[in-house]
Image (cartoon, rainbow, N blue to C red):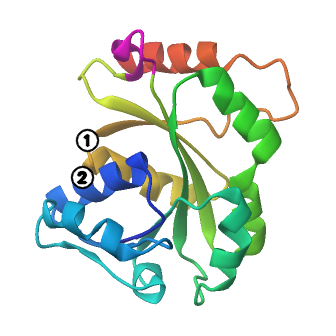
């Protein structure tokens, strides 16, 4: 499978590493310059390289990490991505309540979806609890990773892709109601973990 990465964060680099380790072809485009990441990618093996925006956009799955202020400008430069799966990442979330704030206020993945209406946008979150790292692992000691999507086929595709990368993916699409400002995401994460352990 071809994986395109547009924008650099700890999460997109981790996904690049895991994808390359699984033998996928990974093309990374950094809007701030590919020279900054070329050395790091060499350690991932021969299937991970830097490329142009067009090359990264031609992949089967596109992983996106672009600051909100630059988002529209970068997305407007993309070639036609109709029907493609675009995984919008947020980097690491160290406090589940920060995730709630990010969803209800920033909504950058909804902005991405509105700018790319013919693509299938999936939002990916990677929460990390620094006090108890077991909180983000399932019974098989795999890291949990959370995602939201509206398109059923894309959800299943992304879930299988994340499993292949040795994550334990949790679909929050049906559990998060954005209208409910009092939602406690911390309890959602822990109840999701309990369900996976059963």
Residue 14, position as x, y percentages in the image:
31, 49
Residue 8, position as x, y percentages in the image:
44, 59
Q: Secondary structure at mark 2?
A: helix
Q: Which residues are magenta?
A: 129-136
Q: Foreground: 132 or 189?
A: 132
Q: Secondary structure at mark 1?
A: loop
Which quadrant does the C terminus fall into? top left
Mark yes or no: residue 51 visible.
yes
Horizontal side of residue 22 vs 113, given as left or right: left
Check contact, mark 1 vs mark 2: CB within 8 A.
Answer: yes
Q: Residue at x 33, y 30 (%)?
A: 143
Q: Residue at x 35, y 16 (%)?
A: 133
Labelled disc at residue 18 = 2
Residue 158, position as x, y percentages in the image:
44, 55
Mark yes or no: residue 198 visible.
no
**Splitting the image into 4 quarters, where does residue 137 fall?**
top left
**Splitting the image into 4 quarters, where does residue 4 fall?**
bottom left
**Taking 172 as reference, is 47 above or below it?**
below
Residue 39, position as x, y percentages in the image:
20, 66
Q: Residue furthest top?
A: 131
**Residue 130 falls inside the magenta stretch:** yes
* Distance Cα–Cα, label 1 vs label 2: 8 Å
**Splitting the image into 4 quarters, where does residue 110 fall?**
bottom right
Q: Residue at x 41, y 86 (%)?
A: 52
Mark 1 or 2: the one toward you? 2
Q: Which residue in the protein does label 1 denote? A: 166
**Residue 101 falls inside the magenta stretch:** no
């Amino acid at each position: 499978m071809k994986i395109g990465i547009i924008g650099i964060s700890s999460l997109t680099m981790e996904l690049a590493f895991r994808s390359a380790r699984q033998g996928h072809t990974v093309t990374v485009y950094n809007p701030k310059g590919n020279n900054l990441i070329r050395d790091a990618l060499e350690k991932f093996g021969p299937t991970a390289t830097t490329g142009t925006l067009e090359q990264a956009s031609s992949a089967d799955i596109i992983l996106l990490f672009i600051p909100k202020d630059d988002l529209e400008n970068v997305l407007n430069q993309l070639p036609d991505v109709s029907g493609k799966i675009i995984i919008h990442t947020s980097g690491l979330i160290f406090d589940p309540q920060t995730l709630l704030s990010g969803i209800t206020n920033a909504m950058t993945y909804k902005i991405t979806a509105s700018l790319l209406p013919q693509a299938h946008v999936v939002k990916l979150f990677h929460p990390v609890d620094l006090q108890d790292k077991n909180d983000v692992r399932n019974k098989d000691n795999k890291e949990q990773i959370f995602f939201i999507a509206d398109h059923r086929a894309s959800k299943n595709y992304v879930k299988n892709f994340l499993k292949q990368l040795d994550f334990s993916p949790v679909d929050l699409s049906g559990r998060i109601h954005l209208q409910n400002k009092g939602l406690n995401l911390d309890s959602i994460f822990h109840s999701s973990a309990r369900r996976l352990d059963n």
